[in-house]
Image (cartoon, rainbow, N blue to C red):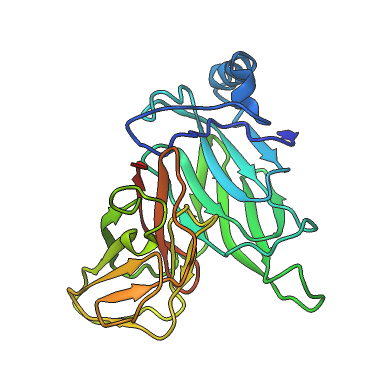
């Protein structure tokens, strides 16, 4: 076990899946030669089954450590469990993703709640329970386990052992990242279009649409139902809502100088779909 305070696994800073940028900053991406040395040692020890336990990033993550992060199909040589903070300010949005992304397929889990990580070790396996609090802004907040993962002896990598939550069939079909003309004033010209690809209507009350990967420009749906096969366009501005158009009411235009991410999450915070976009 390697217990330390900054992410060990590669984190792609460029949200365009066709461009790789493992960045720098306060993580092992800034010390890649050292990480390669540690990771190569992991790969050479067939019976080691290493686990890295990490803190200090105010988010929950699970990663499968790859023999070569530039080759996602390379062998998994270890597991990393990253824990959030219990005392830092900010309640988080509750955005949660079970699985990887196009630019980080080795990621198994993401969540931005506050909380702590509980690890249980036996000779047969390591289990990590992600315990989250409903808020840090009041004293009687609740605590619950949002997900549990396990690493079995002799088998590097993480497996979800808790129940996988329901994911409604909602897809992002179109994104307009900046107002036409890029004039910096027409927020209504910025939008994302969603489609219900299922066979029945979906109550989207409490669903979250974010233009910035869950970290900003978030809109929470009020009472709204999307019929089977129907689409709805969420415009980043103000106007009269209809069955096919909803306005976020946000006054600021998107200001993205690099690729960003539109995500749609259900009322439990589980991401249903995500698409990267490039600012104009």
Residue 162: x percent and y percent? 52, 62
Looking at the picture, does residue 194 appear above or below residue 69? below
Residue at image point 68% right, 49% down: 83
Q: Is residue 85 left or right of residue 238?
A: right
Q: Nearer the viewer, residue 113 or 90?
A: 90
Looking at the picture, does residue 146 appear above or below residue 47? below
What quarter of the picture does the C terminus occupy?
top left
Q: Is residue 38 left or right of residue 97?
A: right
Residue 260: x percent and y percent? 43, 45
Looking at the picture, does residue 272 appear above or below residue 259? below
Residue 71: x percent and y percent? 38, 24
What quarter of the picture does the N terminus occupy?
top right
Q: Is residue 181 left or right of residue 228?
A: right
Q: In the current view of this chain or complex, which residue is farthest to the bottom?
A: 223
Q: Is residue 137 left or right of residue 278?
A: right
Residue 238: x percent and y percent? 40, 73
Residue at image point 68% right, 50% down: 58
Number of numbered tags placed on the structure image: 0
Q: Nearer the viewer, residue 60 or 23?
A: 23
Looking at the picture, does residue 201 appear above or below residue 210? below
């Amino acid at each position: 076990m390697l217990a330390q305070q900054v992410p060990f696994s590669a984190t792609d800073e460029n949200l365009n899946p066709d461009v790789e940028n493992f960045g720098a900053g306060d993580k092992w991406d800034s010390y890649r030669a050292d990480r390669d040395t540690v990771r190569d040692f992991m790969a050479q020890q067939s019976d080691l089954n290493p686990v890295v336990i990490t803190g200090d990033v105010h988010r929950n993550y699970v990663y499968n450590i790859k023999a070569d992060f530039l080759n996602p199909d390379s062998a998994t040589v270890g597991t990393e469990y990253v824990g959030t903070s219990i005392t830092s300010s900010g309640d988080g949005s509750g955005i949660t993703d079970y699985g990887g992304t196009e630019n980080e397929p080795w990621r198994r889990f993401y969540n931005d709640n506050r909380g702590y990580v509980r690890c249980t070790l036996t000779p047969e396996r390591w289990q990590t329970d992600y315990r989250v609090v409903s808020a840090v802004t009041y004293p009687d907040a609740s605590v619950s386990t949002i997900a549990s993962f396990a690493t079995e002896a002799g088998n590097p990598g993480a497996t979800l052992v808790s129940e996988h939550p329901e994911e409604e069939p909602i897809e992002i079909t179109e994104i307009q990242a900046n107002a036409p003309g890029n004039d910096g004033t027409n927020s209504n010209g910025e939008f994302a279009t969603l489609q219900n690809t299922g066979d029945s209507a979906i109550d989207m009350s409490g669903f979250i649409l974010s233009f910035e990967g869950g970290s900003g420009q978030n809109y929470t749906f009020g009472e709204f139902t999307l019929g089977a096969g129907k689409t709805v366009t969420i415009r980043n501005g103000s106007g009269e809502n209809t069955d096919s158009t909803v306005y976020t009411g946000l006054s600021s235009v998107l200001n993205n100088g690099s690729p960003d991410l539109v995500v749609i999450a259900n009322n439990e915070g589980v991401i249903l779909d995500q698409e990267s976009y490039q600012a104009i």
